[in-house]
Image (cartoon, rainbow, N blue to C red):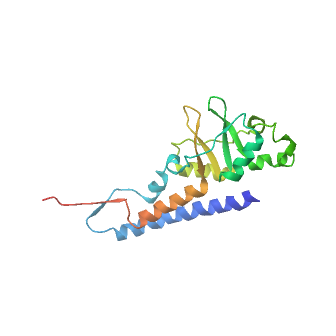
Amino acid sequence: LSILLTAPLGAWAISVVGNRVLTIDAQAAERRPKGTEARGITGDEVVSSLKVSEVMEKDIVVIRENEKLSKILDFFSIYDFLVYPVVDSKNKFIGIIKLENLRSILKEQSCWDWLVAKDVVVSPEENVVPTLLLNEALSRMLRMGIEQIPVIEERSMKPVGILDARKGRKIMEERLIARENGKRYFKVKRNRN
């Protein structure tokens, strides 16, 4: 049910942002103040220039592969993440744990103290890297029907963040609104005599 509700919502949000981009460029050109010089940035470029690293949550909780299930379940009640990256003894990413993957185990409290993260970890369909363009990452997430995904550093294979699709869409919209209002995207020409 959540996939059915979030996928259309995500598609709608991308459509709305895309339509705003088309109208913002025309409106901004009409309102451009005299004495300003456009930097030549279009609405599409504003959105497509954002990288995952600019939006991701960097203060994340990482689960060690030998962490007991009882402690992992505490993370879901303490923190706001829907997905947690799991790492091995060298802090390299080995997979994820999502609450929805634990539903069958939740009924069996007797196993909570002896099951560990590596027993319940799953491989994600895809990962994202900090340098990936935000709009590409959000498109991938929409295709997979997920709201959060770990961000993995390519070279070290260490988790460096969590990308939240809602936060990403919000920041894209804020950038477009700021551009529409002429903030930070125009340089003022000054005559120095």
Q: Position of residue 45 (x, y in %)?
A: 45, 54
Q: Is residue 62 left or right of residue 105?
A: left
Q: Residue at position x 46%, y 60% from top?
A: 175
Identify which residue, 119 or 127, lies in the foreground.
119
Which residue is pictured at 85% across the width and 40% down the height? 111
Relative to residue 25, is residue 141 drawn left or right?
right
Residue 145: tell me if it is visible.
no
Q: Percent position (x, y) of residue 155?
A: 54, 31
Relative to 124, residue 189 above or below: below
Which residue is the extreme one toward the top?
90
Q: Which residue: 24% across, 60% down?
A: 189
Whether residue 55 appears in this view of the structure is yes
The image quadrant that residue 166 belongs to is bottom right
**Residue 35 % position (x, y):** 25, 65
Viewer-closest of 37 and 92: 92
The quadrant in which the N terminus is found is: bottom right
Reply above or below: 30 against 61.
below
For image coordinates 46% across by 65% down, the residue present is 177
Question: Against 57, is 91 above or below?
Answer: above
| Left or right side of 1 for 12 | left
Q: Residue furthest left?
A: 193
Quadrant including the C terminus = bottom left
User: In the rendered image of this protein, does residue 163 appear above or below residue 160?
Assistant: below
- Of residues 30 and 89, the one nearer the viewer is 89
Tally the marks.
0
Spot occupied by residue 10 in the image (x, y as percentages of width and height):
63, 59
